[in-house]
Amino acid sequence: MSGFSFLIAAATGVVVLAVIIGMIVRRRARGEAPLERATDTKRDAKRADAPSQSSRLGKSIHIEGNLTFSEALTIDGTFAGALTSDSSTLTTTAGSRIDGTLAVHHVILGGAVHAEVKAQRVELKATAQLDGNVQCDTITIADGARFDGNVKMDRASEHAGGAPRAHARAASE
């Protein structure tokens, strides 16, 4: 590129930049957004159709039966039956009630649960009330949680190089 061509290209770039800055200043003066983002409707449609990463059963929902899930599940309502998931997290909130059996990878309990629980990891929040036996690798019980049952720590994790662990946390967590 010759020196003259370079100067013309640089001058054109400066002019384009000055025009863009002028547009931004005028838009701000009118109270408009400085730049509008173009939308890709195909990409936005794909995003809307994509499966959610979690599901929630609301306070007014009552389910009886067996439920197998593969994404995170939060229960605010009541459930009676078996809940099963090999790789997901089940969370129950204060005010929820579960009766039955839980065979889930990770369980976070915050409500009333009358169940046999089998999980790799179990957490009882301060609002949890668990009546039933637990079989797990790791259990955490927050200060204030109520637990009536037995815990069996799986020996499988010891053979994998780890040891079963039990933790107690203060209610402030």
Image (spheres, grey):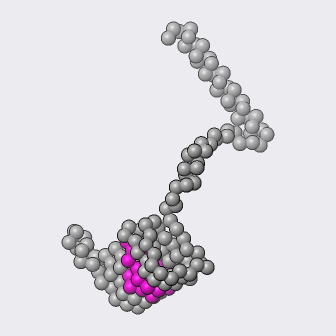
Whether 107 is among the magenta residues is: yes
26 w.r.t. 166: above or below: above
Residue at the far front: name it: 65
Using the rendered image of the protein, determine whether residue 70 is visible from the camera's viewpoint.
Answer: yes
Of residues 65 and 157, the one nearer the viewer is 65
Q: Is residue 111 left or right of residue 86?
A: right
Label tally? 0
**Image coordinates for residue 60, horizontal then vertical, percent:** 61, 79
Q: Is residue 52 above or below residue 106?
A: above
Between 54 and 161, the one nearer to me in the picture: 54
- Residue 144 appears in the picture as rendered: no
Farthest residue in the left direction? 159
- Residue 18, placed above or below residue 88: above
Q: Residue 36: percent from the left, percent from the top?
A: 67, 40
Q: Which residue does the image show at 56% across and 81% down from the upper left? A: 62
Q: Nearer the viewer, residue 85 or 92?
A: 85
Residue shown at the point (25%, 72%) measured from the top left: 157
Residue 31 occupies which quadrant of the picture? top right
**Magenta part, dominant SS:** strand
- Seen at 51% across and 82% down, the residue is 64
- Residue 9's spot in the image, x, y percent? 58, 16
Q: Residue at horizontal 43%, vertical 80%? A: 82
Nearer to me, 27 or 73: 73
Q: Is residue 104 magenta?
A: yes
Residue, far bottom: 148
- Position of residue 122 measured from the top left corner of the image (x, y, whole percent): 39, 77
- Taking 1 as reference, is 139 left or right? left
Q: Which residues are magenta?
A: 98-117
